[in-house]
Amino acid sequence: MWLWIAEGFIRNVDQKALPEDVAEGYLMDLIGRSLVMASQKGSDGRVKACLVHDMLRTLCLTKIQEENFLESITGYDKLFPSPRIRLDCGVDSDCYCPSITYNQHRLSICSKRNQFVMLKPSSPCVRSLLFFAISDKYPRCPYDISFISDNFKLLRVLDVESINVGSSFPTGIELLDTLRYLAVSGDIDSIPSTISKLWRLEIFIVKGLKGKVALPDTLWSMTRLRHLHVNSNAIFSWQDESLTSSSRLDNLVTLSSPILSYGDDTEKIMRKFPKLRKLRCTFSESSHQSGNCSRFPLLEFLTELESLKIFYYGGMHHSCEFNFPLNLKKLSLSDFILSWSSIFAIGILPKLEVLKLVSIDFDSPIWEMREDEFCVLKFLKLDNLDIVQWNAYSDHLPNLQRLVLRSCKQLQDVPSGFGEISTLQMIELRWCSNSAENSVRAIQEEQLAYGNEGFQVFVNIPDAAFRSF
């Protein structure tokens, strides 16, 4: 849907609605008409991946050709239409090859990386260039793609994420000032300050193959940015004057994945993203501690934040304290030490619907659930936890729909009261104890006795069957 936004396909009639919400509405309309099939859903029930029927795909390809909408090139023969070119150039990326010019506004190429670089396609007309790599022997081999800025002057969309551009950010990219969508990948460890010349950029995706990627302080001038995704981690290497300035990214709704630590600088940075809706980050413990407790940066001021995913990096020796925004709907925590009082604080978040706890060490092996917590929770995932005893009743999780338990090998039983939760649809159990499995079977019998015919139990099912979770 990010591509739809960058292409200008989303017409926002309601000025208060975000383009992402309008795009999701379009997608759900297509699914409702059976034109598109949802092949994968997230824990919150939202569509993550789609498929189209072969007949519809054939129809789309026909219409694409009729309306000159897109040039789609797949494979060696289509990439090199002239037998002479194929014979002369082979697969040598240093070989001279006459550049082929295309007249469509959108160009999609699926080939081996070296063949694409060798061809050096060009067009004064192309507005969108998408490259998808076919598997080859050297997927990490770096390539020079500087020809793109010379051969495609008017690009709005550039996706070359499947090519390793090397240790330096591609030269000339900053000259493509019409770009709205940019996806790159490489051994780069920093983004140059000249990236701010792309003042129209809305979606920026960087895959750093070496790990951490430093962001420049000129990022503040890119006020149209809506989605910033850096994999695996982004580092804010900004000067003090940047932190104290009044500049903000008021349109940014997605940020992934900065490294955060407790301190005033982190809070100053995060306050510059007031409209953030989705945050994926890594927490690195700093020297700022409160007694025997580590503190996660304050995020209460991010009043529109709905989805938060946090990984801990380093050797944690203390339990962690959080102050989450009240509008949070989806929360995932990995590799933390937590007290049960912290879980209670999470449980009273009034809108929390999805909770995932992965590789968490608790201060006690007994989870004693309390009243008035997790009142609207629909999805609960517990993965690699050291819980032994879980005491809960049906009224503790009154709206639970799906429960996923993985590698909770010490857990003796799943609370029998879950057999009375009328909303429960599914329990997945993997790599847990036999007694836990037996308790889930008993819950299944009780659910069926209450007339919940759609209730399902999955025990030790392969990962491929659970892409939705």
Image: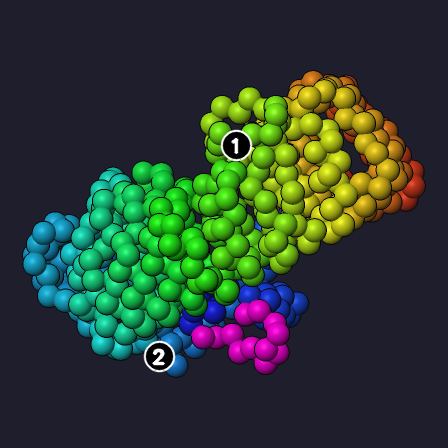
Res. 103 visible in picture = yes
**Residue 9 on the magenta segment:** yes
Give the colour scheme shown.
rainbow
Image: 246 above or below 291: below
x and y percentages locating residue 53 in the rendered image: 53, 62
Res. 130 visible in picture = no
Q: Would residue 418 appear left or right of 407 to someone viewing this image?
A: right
Mark 1 burial class by Cα count in 10 Å: few <14, some 14-19, many 20+ = few
The residue that appears at 67% across and 32% down in the rendered structure is: 382
Residue where numbered disc 2 is placed: 68
Image: 177 above or below 258: below
**Residue 387 on the magenta segment:** no
Q: Which stretch did the figure color magenta? A: 8-19
Residue where numbered disc 1 is placed: 288
Q: Would residue 190 appear left or right of 34 to someone viewing this image?
A: left
Q: Would residue 229 appear left or right of 17 to someone viewing this image?
A: left
Looking at the rendered structure, the secondary structure element under dot 2 is loop
| Image quadrant in which you'd find residue 394 | top right
- Amino acid type at circle 2 is Asn
